[in-house]
Amino acid sequence: MRVRTVATAAFEDQKPGTSGLRKKVARFHTPHYLENFVQATFDAVRPPAGAMLVVGGDGRYYNREALQTIVRIAVANGIGRLVIGQGGLLSTPAVSHLIRMRGAFGGMILSASHNPAGPDEDFGIKYNIGNGGPAPEAVTESIHECTRRIREYRIADTADIDLDRLGSQRVGGMDIEIVDPVADYAALMERLFDFDRIAQLFRDGFRMRFDAMHAVTGPYASEIFERRLGAPAGTVINSIPLPDFGGGHPDPNLVHAHGLVQEMMVEGGPDFGAASDGDGDRNMILGRGSYVGPGDSLAILAANAHLVPGYADGLQGVARSLVTSAAVDRVADKLGIAHYSTPTGWKFFGSLLDAGLISLCGEESFGTGSDHVREKDGLWAVLFWLNILAATGRSVGDIQRAHWAEYGRNYFTRHDYEGLAADEIVAHLRARIEGAEADPGHRAFEFSYSDPVDGSESHGQGLCFHRGEGERIVYRLSGTGTEGATLRVYIERYELPEGALDHDPQAALAQLIAESRRIASLDRLGIGAPSAIT
């Protein structure tokens, strides 16, 4: 095996975002582009000689080719073992679990999550550390610095490995193990949830529909729901992972999973519906005629965790991102446990989980998880809901309405304005914060976060305008797209248990929605209706 040192030049657009480096496939096809980023990652994290890494992806276009490049650079950099999912497939939570289970040094995930896939669409790569979670800011900043000063990378001249044959292979001095991508993850789920009780639910005639969106969760969902739990064949739809996700947009929300939503909203539809995204870390929950928002879902899981074997001993605490509905805070207060508010990005939950301060956590972007891995986990959330349904014998809608009757309802929506030159808007909002007059009923501030475990600080994490008790508007630029800037506006209002709990969120929040446009001067800037509403 010959190892070459290849001269290169830095690229100026390789700063990792909240979920790694995401660009169009064409950009990754630029000579040296992927190689530079992988080498810079190794230079930044400095794996010891012989280290083990876990590598896999969501099966999108360019997944297999990129994985072969990573193999060649890994062996040239002295990596001792790569654990790779068969076919190059591993869901993001499965990568996290394998890193933790195997005691690996870290891992690489090839995905652009919920972004579309195909030759003209998106690709991504991110590094996860030894706890199984996304690299913290100090690591991503180091990677970025290495991408800026890279002058050469090391790569081995080797033939492609066989990604489809289970078992061991050897490339130079490095062992490669091709593993079943589903088996270890499914075994973990069986330890956390009452599979016997859920299986009985299906034997009793319970009907479910799960949309895998032609992404990575298809094989996981088919194995767990249909084979292990006995759900009828056809329960899982769009189950074959495709390089272009079947031409769809693998984002489990009311817009992109519209076929599932339509099926669930008719009389006689399935009892339960769910979907996951490209890499398997997001989830959407539906009942017949009902939809559960991510903030409500996290709160309901926390309130009912005692019904689930893996959490029956109680929760240590809960956490949510700042921009997520505060519904779970009210549950935590009643349970007498701590609750935390973090910046957006799953990496901020990692230190809280590692320190044992929290058991459950979630984000408004359809991500929910726990201390079983260090990533959000779509199928885990679906199984959690199934366990609650099996234990209570109630419908999704009944559970949600009972929750509101006990805790009140946090009306919540997110309005996205895509493709903006957002600098002017952000500068305007910061000026409004700086010039805000003292008012006992109003607060305006830019959110900064100090990690309670390691003391690390993150600034500029959201522009917040609180309008009275339980009302708030938060503005934030997205870091997960590949083109332009997306301004996300989060709007929330709390309604007491004895109040009006069954309104449509857009109607219930109409005044705050209008206020959100006024504060940001969107009409003055000629910015029309939101690109997306969730």
Image (spheres, grey):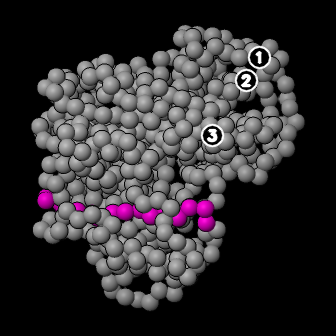
Camera-side residue: 495 or 334? 495
Q: Position of residue 223 (x, y in %)?
A: 36, 21
- Mark 1 or 3: in front is 3
| Mark number, residue 158 | 1
- Residue 15, image x, y percentages: 68, 51
Nearer the N terminus, badge 3 or badge 2? 2
Magenta residues, dominant SS class: strand
Q: The disc labelled 3 sits on which kind of residue?
A: Phe
Lateral position of residue 182 relative to residue 235, left or right? right
The quadrant in which residue 497 appears is bottom left
N-terminal of the pair, mark 2 or mark 1, is 2
Residue type beneath disc 1:
Thr
Q: Compute the Cα span from label 3 to label 2.
A: 19 Å
Residue 233 in the image: above or below residue 91: above
Marks 1 and 3 in Cβ contact (< 8 Å): no
297 vs 59, left or right, is left
* Residue 72 - label: 2
Q: Which residue is the site of mark 3? A: 123
In the rendered view, tell whether residue 62 sits above or below residue 162: below
Q: Is residue 346 magenta?
A: no
Q: Nearer the viewer, residue 21 or 5?
A: 21
- Determine whether the residue tagged by mark 3 lies in a helix, strand or loop: strand
Residue drawn 60% across the image and 45% down it: 20
Residue segment shown in magenta:
405-420
Tag 2 secondary structure: helix
Q: Where residue 534 sits in the image (x, y, percent)?
A: 40, 57
Label 2 CA crowd tier, 10 Å (few <14, some 14–19, many 20+): many
Q: Is mark 1 on a helix, strand or loop?
A: loop
Assess whether mark 2 and mark 3 are in contact (beta carbons under 8 angstroms).
no
